[in-house]
Image: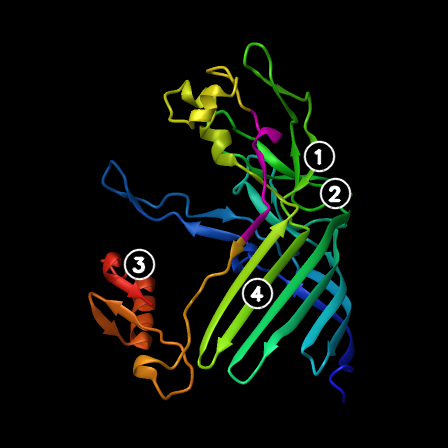
Amino acid sequence: MSDSNMSTLKLRLSAGLTGNQEGVGYGSYTNRSRWNGLNPANDGFIDIGNGNSLVSYGGPELKWESTLQYATGLDFGFNNDRLSGSIDVYRKETIDLIFNTPQAQPAVTPVKFENLPDSKIVNQGVEFSLGYDLVESEDFNWSANFNVAYNDNMVESLLGQYDFADVNGPGLTGAFAMRLQEGYPMFSYYLLEFEGYDAAGQAIVSDEKSFVGKSALPNLTGGLSTNLNYKQFSLSAYFNGQFGHYIYNNTANAFFTAGAFGTTRNVLPETLTSGEAIGASAPASTRFLEKGDFVRQGEVIGFVGNSGNAEGTVPHLHFEIQYLGTSQDIYEFVLQSWINYEKGKLFPKNTKDLLIY
């Protein structure tokens, strides 16, 4: 086949049904009780207490979340796959969503895992990747890869509404930042709208909470990588990013306000020049919503080559653990670390003397 022709063309179709129970744990399926133990009484006798007491309610009706996924994809390549890529379109439908729901008080536990009634979450989107070998020669090669994905999340059906994502701190008892409700994405912020400060330095917020059109879920993700190889040496770089999501700054809400300064807490310098009055209340609001977009460089774990003591060998990566200046057997070190962790010990104690490279 000529280098100028298409070298790869593949159509993929897939469908599948999977279950999920992550985070539920065994104890969520059955009632759990605890023996109260024996206690010495003032008269010298042994008080057997109340015997067993219930510590959590079970959920024998609890079942897996079920996700039906179907997708189609296209792989392509040109010039003997010097230029290659793929595009995928998918749809995921999740039903019987597992959620930690509040229980009517008084109750043994404040929350309980349940399958939300008539719940259906839909994720659908498209993924695209492209790779190109920029330079191909006997001694030097340079390639680059790019990928981007878009995902749309929506609660298509749900009976009722559920508040979650507690906001903690002084004066924030019972505050929350998100609501799960039909017709909105998961992790949608449900907050008071912050509009600034009045002449007295008090926060101006909306009368009622509402969906503010922002979510903690990114709808766009992407990555870019490049690899250079010269003879037996290689160098690579990787960048990834997420866009379109927001993060609630609970720390700022709880501690970095003029009201917090009024209770002798340390605050950021800009807090005192924001126009907020000392002692003003700071309810959970869009004031503390921040854009979560980021691009960061991937972590470099090492370089490969055949120089120095490795001269004459195939390219490979050295990995060594040193503790107190002495090289450690990796298998024994990891095994002993796990054994000590299981015993509740800290290992190693002198972490400043631990080198991993």
Label placed on residue 211: 1
Q: Do the residues labelled 1 and 2 touch (CB within 8 Å)?
A: yes
Q: Do the residues labelled 2 and 3 touch (CB within 8 Å)?
A: no
- Local secondary structure at mark 2: loop
- Which is more N-terminal, label 4 or label 2? 2
**In this orientation, does residue 356 appear?**
yes
Per the image, the residue denoted by label 3 is 344
**In this orientation, does residue 285 appear?**
no
- Which is more N-terminal, label 1 or label 4? 1
Q: In this view, does 187 lie to the left or right of 117?
A: left
Cα separation, mark 1 vs mark 2, equals 8 Å
- Which is more N-terminal, label 4 or label 3? 4
Amino acid tagged 3: Gly
Cα separation, mark 4 vs mark 1, equals 37 Å
Amino acid tagged 2: Tyr
Cα separation, mark 1 vs mark 3, equals 44 Å
Per the image, the residue denoted by label 2 is 184
Label placed on residue 225: 4
Find the magenta span and give its range.
283-295
Cα separation, mark 3 vs mark 4, equals 41 Å
Cα separation, mark 2 vs mark 3, equals 44 Å
* CA neighbours of label 3 inside 10 A, class few (<14), some (14 to 19), many (20+): few
